[in-house]
Amino acid sequence: MTETLADEDQKLVVLARGALARAEARSGAAVRDGDGRTYAGAEVRTKTLTLSGLQVAVASAISSGAGSFEAAVLVNGDADDPGLATLHELSPQAYAYVTDAAGRPQQRLGGADV
């Protein structure tokens, strides 16, 4: 994929990469809600809790009052991330980019033009 991300989507990449670096995780994610606010998270893996970075970011947004989403970025993530189901449950029109660890887009999921 040779798509160049819009500036607002590139901001999500920066936030997601920051979250995964702080947590020393394998992957991270960031979302933009319907009001333009952003939330980031890294994967959580303990004996009793396993969440993807996208699930963390979406849950943070919802717990902060977000009712809809515009976009998400999954850095070093997967197209079958369970957080995508929640993202699209609240906002079927939302799109997500899956990127490699460096933040280069590998796949676009969802959205009106896909």
Image: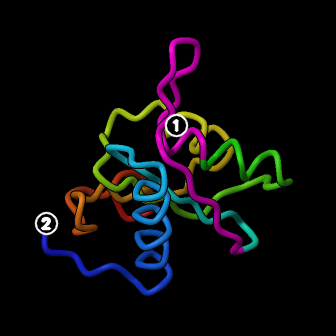
- Amino acid type at circle 1 is Gly
> Cα distance, mark 2 to mark 1?
22 Å
Kindly identify the amino acid type of the residue bearing the numbered disc 2.
Met
Residue bearing the label numbered 2: 1
Residue 49, image x, y percentages: 57, 19
Residue 27 or 37: which is nearer the viewer? 27
Q: Which mark is residue 83?
A: 1
Q: Is residue 107 left or right of residue 72?
A: left
The spot of residue 114 in percent (x, y) is: 33, 58
Q: Residue at 51% across / 13% down in the picture?
A: 47
Which residue range is magenta in the image? 36-56
Query: In the rendered structure, are the residues bearing label 2 and label 1 in contact, judged by CB atoms less than 8 Å apart?
Result: no
Residue name at image x 45 percent, y 75 percent: 9
Give the secondary structure at mark 1: helix
Can residue 41 be found in the magenta stretch?
yes
Residue in view at x 57 percent, y 59 percent: 31
Q: Is residue 111 left or right of residue 102?
A: right
Disc on the earlier residue, 2 or 1: 2
Q: Determine which quarter of the picture holds residue 63.
A: top right
